[in-house]
Image (cartoon, coloured by chain):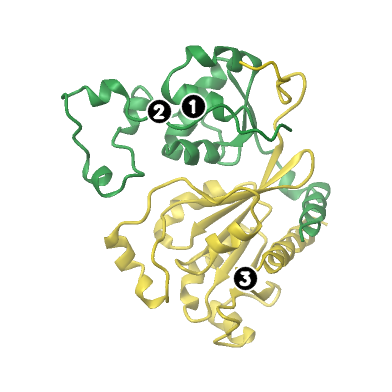
Amino acid sequence: MPTDPPPSWEPLGPRPYVAGHRGVDVPTPAAASDPQVSGVRPYLITGGRARPIDSTLHVETQVLTTWDGRAALDTLTYEHRDIVALCVRPSAVAEVAAHLRLHLGVARVLVADLVATGYLVIRQPEVGAHQQVQIIERVIRGLKAIR
Amino acid sequence: MDSKPFVDAPGTGRPPLPVKIVIAGGFGVGKTTAVSQISEIPVLTTEAPITEIAADIDRTGQVPSKTTTTVALDFGCITIDEEVKLYLFGTPGQDRFGFMWRDLTEGALGGLVIVDSRRLDDGYPAVDYFEKTGLPFVVAVNLFDGFLSHNLEDVRWALAVSDDIPIVTFDARDRGSVRDALLAVLQRSLARVS
């Protein structure tokens, strides 16, 4: 695994079409009191959709950028670009949300979009893995190695 | 763009298999501290810091030196081996966040309910939920400054947990202690399936 940080995934800031809406920035009460809360409404980022194409994405589902995604990076914009850049290293859906300061539901919608376009692949938790002796024992061994 | 091989691209590798343990407990009980001690990434939070109104409801004033808290999820992760990655999701143990719990506990290896022996009732909703859903879990009493307000049998009685649920003491600030509490959870997970 490379130890260099992935290409910049820092959020790019307010979307111009939002900032330009009234020519001035009118923060919501939440945004005004908390710099970590985006003033952009979630439905703007997702194009009005509240549910992901694939509604089965779990918080721990692993997300990884594909070759196609990497090749398309320069053509992508805003959150799509941030996610594809971040997931050059495998990340959980919850990590995508946290790093990009997106609501978890928004992150799910966007990840599902990018999977549909082939820029990301996912690995879901395996059904029943939590009840497999072999998996539990592997986790026990891994934890015991921690000093 | 560099030409470094893209190690995990399809065809050359897969994303890791995620597994998870849910860590529940009231505000200020040491969930985030525990996760941060053992996580290989800095603890991440998905949602917003709690508002002042909610902070008042959550009685943080009763807990010494807890100044900030968050709604929703704090989490970290541990790479177990070349394929398996363990996520630790910390979630407030209040009933009003119950809507998140089904999502979180589905497919979880187990749960760790952290309690503060001075505020045992905060641990009750999580204990209740884990018992109802059949999730293997352990109750861990966080020893603030090494101090235990009640003996463990009193804790068991107050939380009304059955005799087969382990109750352990631990120090959320100590990595080895957090690891051992998680290992206790996994022993329960193992006992359920073997």
- Residue B70, percent from left and from top: 41, 56
Q: Residue at x 70, y 21 (%)?
A: B6
Between B26 and B158, the one nearer to me in the picture: B26
User: Which chain is yellow in the rendering?
Assistant: B
Mark 1 touching mark 2, by CB under 8 A? yes
Subunit of mark 3? B
Element marked by disc 3: strand
Mark 1 touching mark 3, by CB under 8 A? no
Label 1, label 2: how many angstroms apart (C-alpha)? 8 Å
User: Which chain is green in the rendering?
Assistant: A
Label 1, label 3: how many angstroms apart (C-alpha)? 39 Å
Residue position marked by numbered label 3 in the rendering: B139
Between B156 and B55, the one nearer to me in the picture: B55
- Residue B102, percent from left and from top: 53, 49
Q: Which mark is residue A82?
A: 1
Residue position marked by numbered label 2 in the rendering: A12
Subunit of mark 2? A
Q: Residue at x 38, y 30 (%)?
A: A50
